[in-house]
Image (cartoon, rainbow, N blue to C red):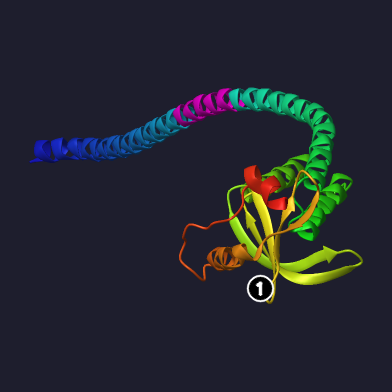
Amino acid sequence: MKAVWLVALLAAPLSVQAQQALQQAQQESRELTAEAVATQQRIDNLDDAARAALEEYTQAQDQALALNDYSERLQSMVEAQAQELTSLQQQIDSLADTQREMLPLIRRMIESLEAFVALDMPFLLDEREDRIARLQDLLIDPEISVAELYRRVLEAYQIESDYGRTLEAWRGQLPAGEQERVVEFLRIGRLMLFYQSLDGQEQGYWDTAAGRWQVLPASYRRALSNGIAIARNEQSPQLLRLPMPAVSAEVAQ
């Protein structure tokens, strides 16, 4: 019995020490585990940071490439715009030269139109002379561009040209010495210009060669009345027996 108790007494301290050692080992194991977990967390964090940095770097690289491409395109646009500006400036300079050359031409065109109206048959003189007067006013108007002035002159020429292809009748003043009287006029293109009194008792034509009005025989009364009605769309077109320039001299005799 004594021997057994001695062995037990000797064994008891060893069990306590073993238990303490075990507890210490467990504590160290837990600490190592915690440190390993922390280390792994740091590694994971570093890995996430590395991936984020790589992604940020990739995005920055993509943006740099996009900006470089945009810069190249912008440079191309700037160069193209510079060329366009140069071309526009050349066109403006050319236009200025053209305008300086056009003004004398337009002035001569207006003068020619004025002379033509003065030598032409005396129909719608007030209207035609007013049109020329407006062109002369526009010629010295600084607010009117050369292009607009040229367009107006061409328009006036077109109107004069149209007179040669139309039939027209109107009521107006016929000069008769110191007095004027109202008559009906009939214009057949630029070929002939006739008049007829309002009562239909007198008619005549403009003698271009003599530069004056000539009286027509009464036999032309009905033809002139019909011609005036046709020009006003009051009667259907028909053949009219009227004197033409080739026979005007004979009629005048």
Q: How many marks?
A: 1
| Magenta stretch, main secondary structure class | helix
- Confirm whether the magenta stretch covers residue 68: yes
User: With respect to residue 91, does 211 lie above or below?
Assistant: below
Q: Residue 15 falls in which quadrant of the image?
A: top left
Q: Residue at x 78, y 40 (%)?
A: 146
User: With respect to residue 187, does 16 lie above or below?
Assistant: above
- Confirm whether the magenta stretch covers residue 159: no
Q: Residue at x 58, y 53 (%)?
A: 166
Give whichever of 14, 164 is nearer the camera.
164
Q: Amino acid at mark 1?
A: Gly
Q: Residue 197 falls in which quadrant of the image?
A: bottom right
Q: In this view, which residue lies farthest toward the right?
A: 178
Give whichever of 146, 91 is nearer the camera.
146
Q: Which residues are magenta?
A: 58-74
Q: Where residue 35 sits in the image (x, y, percent)?
A: 37, 35
User: With respect to residue 165, does 73 lie above or below?
Assistant: above
> How dense is the environment of label 1, judged by Cα within 10 Å: few (below 14), some, or many (20 and up)?
some
Give whichever of 63, 186 is nearer the camera.
186
Residue 155 is at least partly visible in this image: no
Q: Where residue 157 sits in the image (x, y, percent)?
A: 70, 44
Q: Residue 111 falls in which quadrant of the image?
A: top right
Q: Residue at x 80, y 44 (%)?
A: 119
Q: Which residue is mark 1?
A: 200
Give whichever of 81, 67 is nearer the camera.
81
Q: In this view, which residue lies farthest toward the left?
A: 1
User: Relative to residue 154, is residue 11 drawn left or right?
Assistant: left
Q: In this view, which residue lies farthest toward the bottom?
A: 199
User: Relative to residue 108, is residue 218 drawn left or right?
Assistant: left
Q: Where residue 141 sits in the image (x, y, percent)?
A: 87, 48
Residue 179 is at least partly visible in this image: yes
State which quarter of the image contains the N terminus: top left
